[in-house]
Image (cartoon, rainbow, N blue to C red):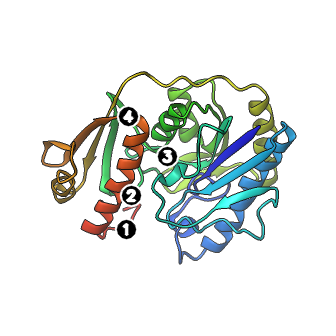
Amino acid sequence: MKVYVSADMEGVTGLVDAEDVQPPGRDYERGRVLMTQDVNAAIRGAYAAGATAVLVNDAHGPMRNLLPDLLDPRARLIKGRPKPMGMIEGLTSEYEATVCIGFHARAGVLGVLSHSFMGHEIEDIWLDDQLTGEIGLLHAASAAYGVPVALLTGDDTACDEMKSWDPTVATVPVKFAKDRFAAQLVPVAESHESIETTAAQALRSLSPSDAPPGPRTLTVRWQSASVASHLTAIPGVERRDDRTVTVEGDMLQLYRLFNLFLRVCTAVTSNPPYC
């Protein structure tokens, strides 16, 4: 069994603030250790369930957060950016399960460090008519490969968001949101034990993942009308209003195109995340 791990950081055990997850934050280096430990717990669970290979994609921010020398040596790591497929770089139909570690809720939800990809630059995302964020888009793209999401870890709001997309996905809440930058934490050792045991259980009892047939529609509402204006230069992208663009296509094409949207937005704006 080949297992794919996408590792974000905002939903990692013990982390609640931008200083924990962004260089050169005063607690960022400690956050990198905690992120690597959460991923290692999932890797241990995967091998306990019979995994023959585990690929980990560092999916947060600069995508250079995980510490290779502390990572379980049985896993392989994708590190750095840019990546054409961003948070699912390296995922293919050869994998039998996707595991999401350290994820967070979408923009507009009162979860720890909640946002959708770019801080306040993205106000809302819809896949077809459903509001989504990083969790929903990753789930849909993984399903398009025919790979079920087995597990998600993060705060309780992120876990609830995943359950609203797919109730068969196992979740591990490693903290409980009190506000956007505050949470009640699960003790580190307890969190790691839960991640490891739940990953093993989830991978032993996978549910098939069926993607909806036909093209999907992706709609993004930006904070800046300038971003929307620039994106209309991409063939197929239409503007619904000054700040909202929409495009139709195959789910995997849309996911790759959305990563291009993010690069255009970065070039057009210079706002920091979490504002």
* C-alpha distance separating marks 2 and 4: 26 Å
**Of residues 138 and 102, the one drawn nearer to the viewer in this rendering:** 138
Q: How many marks?
A: 4
Q: Is residue 71 above or below residue 94?
A: below
* Precedes in sequence: disc 3 or disc 4: 3
The quadrant of the image that shows the N terminus is: top right
Provide the secondary structure element on which disc 1 rests: loop
- Marks 2 and 1: CB-CB under 8 Å? yes
Which amino acid is tagged 3? Answer: Gly
Provide the secondary structure element on which disc 2 rests: helix
* C-alpha distance separating marks 3 and 2: 13 Å
Please tell me the numbered disc located at residue 260. none
Q: Is residue 44 above or below residue 18?
A: above
Please tell me the numbered disc located at residue 119. 2
* Precedes in sequence: disc 4 or disc 1: 4
Provide the secondary structure element on which disc 3 rests: loop
Which amino acid is tagged 1? Answer: Pro
Mark 4 residue crowding within 10 angstroms, few (<14) / some (14–19) / many (20+): some
* C-alpha distance separating marks 3 and 1: 19 Å
Mark 2 residue crowding within 10 angstroms, few (<14) / some (14–19) / many (20+): some
Q: At 12% from the left edge and 48% from the top edge, which residue is drawn? A: 242
Which amino acid is tagged 2? Answer: Gly
* C-alpha distance separating marks 2 and 1: 7 Å
**Of residues 82 and 229, the one drawn nearer to the viewer in this rendering:** 82
* C-alpha distance separating marks 3 and 4: 30 Å
* Precedes in sequence: disc 2 or disc 1: 2
Label 1: which residue? 272
Q: At 80% from the left edge and 36% from the top edge, which residue is drawn? A: 200
Residue 51 position within the rendered picture, expressed as x and y whole percent measured from the top left: 80, 41
